[in-house]
Image (cartoon, coloured by chain):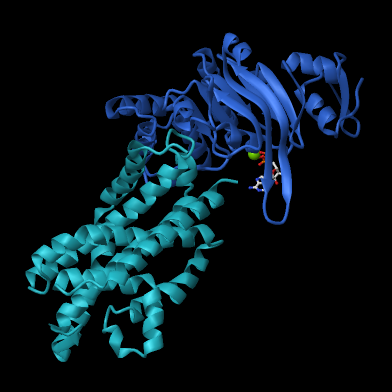
Amino acid sequence: MEKYLSENNLLVVENLKKIYSSKKSSFTAVDDISFTVKKGECFGLLGPNGAGKSTSMNCITGFYPINHGKILINNIDVHKSPKLARRFLGVCSQDDSLDTDFSVIDQMVTYASYFGIDKKTAQEKSESLLKRFFLDDKAKENVESLSGGMRRRLQVARALVGDPQVLILDEPTTGLDPEVRRELWDIIVESREKGMAILLSTHYMDEAERLCDRIAILHNGKILDCDTPQNLITRHAGTNIIEEEIRPGMKWKRPPNIEDVYLNLTGRGLNIN
Amino acid sequence: MQTTFWGIYCVWLRYFKVFRKSLIYGLVTTFTEPILYLLSFGFGLGSLIGTIKVAGMTLTYKQFVFSGIVAQTVMFQGFFEAAYGSFIRMYYQKVFQALAVTTITIPEILWGEILWDASKASFSVFVILLIGCLTGNFSVLGSVIVFPFCFIFAMLFASLGLLVAAKARTIEEISYPQYLFIFPMFLFCGVFFPLETLPKYVQWFAWLLPLTSVASIIRSCLLGLPVIPISILITTIWLIILITWSRRAMINRLVK
Ligand SMILES: Nc1ncnc2c1ncn2[C@@H]1O[C@H](COP(=O)(O)OP(=O)(O)OP(=O)(O)O)[C@@H](O)[C@H]1O
Ligand SMILES: [Mg+2]
């Protein structure tokens, strides 16, 4: 415990193991993973569909019980004292969990109240967040009248309304247009600069490379490797320029990137040395 | 897991805000049904039948059926709000899932749910009690005494609804318990006619179901009849079983 405290770690995941069990079968979705996310750090979780990213995140928020290990948010065990630990946790889940019974602004204000934030502060905070997310003109509208991308943005905005120190974003940019995606990147960078510890999962490799200070590649519930994007690339994709034939007769030269690392580690790589 | 009054209140308040926002819808769905029953059975049928004898006392049928409709309202409002409402909130809207990653815990969410359902049922009950008192069918003191009990009985049926929602794979499956459990209770547990008119073995069976006891207690309070002790025991047992079972079932459904 002491070693984590000294390192300014806002999120500690230690030997996390999660087994889904039903009467018929049991399945190990997350198999003994450990990592930490520091104040002001963005940590990326990459991996194929079904790798266990969402499962890990659901365990980290304390929503799912775990079979082994420990999760500390701000040095508080989330499974032992969920109320205390989650006071500074912001979550954007992969599933849309917006409350369709409320308008956009009421949604934010009500959500803030679940963190014990008073009404006036909540109102101000919500308005400024909606503005930042370019949703202020939709404030009075019902959630159901928003487009898919707007709903996604609102869910990220809602995750920020409680002034979190640890932010968990499960594929926040899925379904966003390129411009809005960049806007969201800016917001993530701002949040990181404000000192939040961010845990991000994504299927966009460029996004991970751009935003994440460190990346873990998850496969079948195990972390295959975890390091800075540059170190991962050097280690698993080399430093040589890669020549790729994208179409018969059309070749493309490019430096190695995180996608090569991902493909190499999870099994469909070109085995470049 | 930690449960605080504040957390339960936050959840309750969420429901109340939604209710207040669509007040007209809420009022229409909460009040029309019992009022229609009152009109049709109370004033319609009631003026045909005149008086009946229950537990050695002579009552007007109107009094009898009015008090039965209080019990029926407790059951219908409690059950339907919980069964369909919580299924929608859990399955489609994912309200429970969104709440459960804030400082609110799942036990608090489920208490908030049941207490809200019971509150909503109590709004309906209040209106019927008022009508019953104004038309001289209920004793005012009895109405005041019965009101908190109605809230608890509504919690019983709300837990039943929550259990059904937790077990139903699709929203259509809620119809099974609705037709096989709720409607039979509605028809055979002493809401519309005294149980004594039924064959003995049907009476025994009816007494095992929660609505018979609930209706009996409510009627006793409202009309000044003696309370049958076993009815208190049966209600308490159902209440404990359903609350415990529904909470466990819903937690298993939500948390994997
Ligand atoms: N409730 C559940 N019960 C049983 N198994 C589950 C459950 N939820 C997920 N799984 C299994 O656990 C594994 C990990 O799923 P998870 O949702 O964590 O993947 P993921 O990495 O988030 O994938 P994606 O990129 O598709 O979102 C999958 O094999 C999935 O089938
Ligand atoms: Mg996922």
Q: Nearer the viewer, residue B248 or B86?
A: B248
Most distant residue in the top direction? A6
Q: Residue at x 46, y 76 (%)?
A: B180
Whether residue A241 sits left or right of residue A71 in the image: it is: right
Q: Residue at x 29, y 65 (%)?
A: B74
* Residue A209 place in picture, x, y as percent: 69, 20
| Quarter of the image where ligand 2 sits | top right
Tell me which chain appears blue.
Answer: A
Location of residue B139 (image quadrant): bottom left
* Residue A212 place in picture, x, y as percent: 65, 19
The answer to whether any part of residue A257 appears in the image is yes
Q: Is residue A43 above or below residue B48?
A: above
Q: Colour of chain B?
A: cyan
Whether residue B130 sits left or right of residue A136 in the image: it is: left
* Residue A222 place in picture, x, y as percent: 76, 32
Whether residue B140 sits left or right of residue A58 in the image: it is: left
Q: Is residue B158 above or below residue A134?
A: below
Q: Nearer the viewer, residue A182 or A86?
A: A86
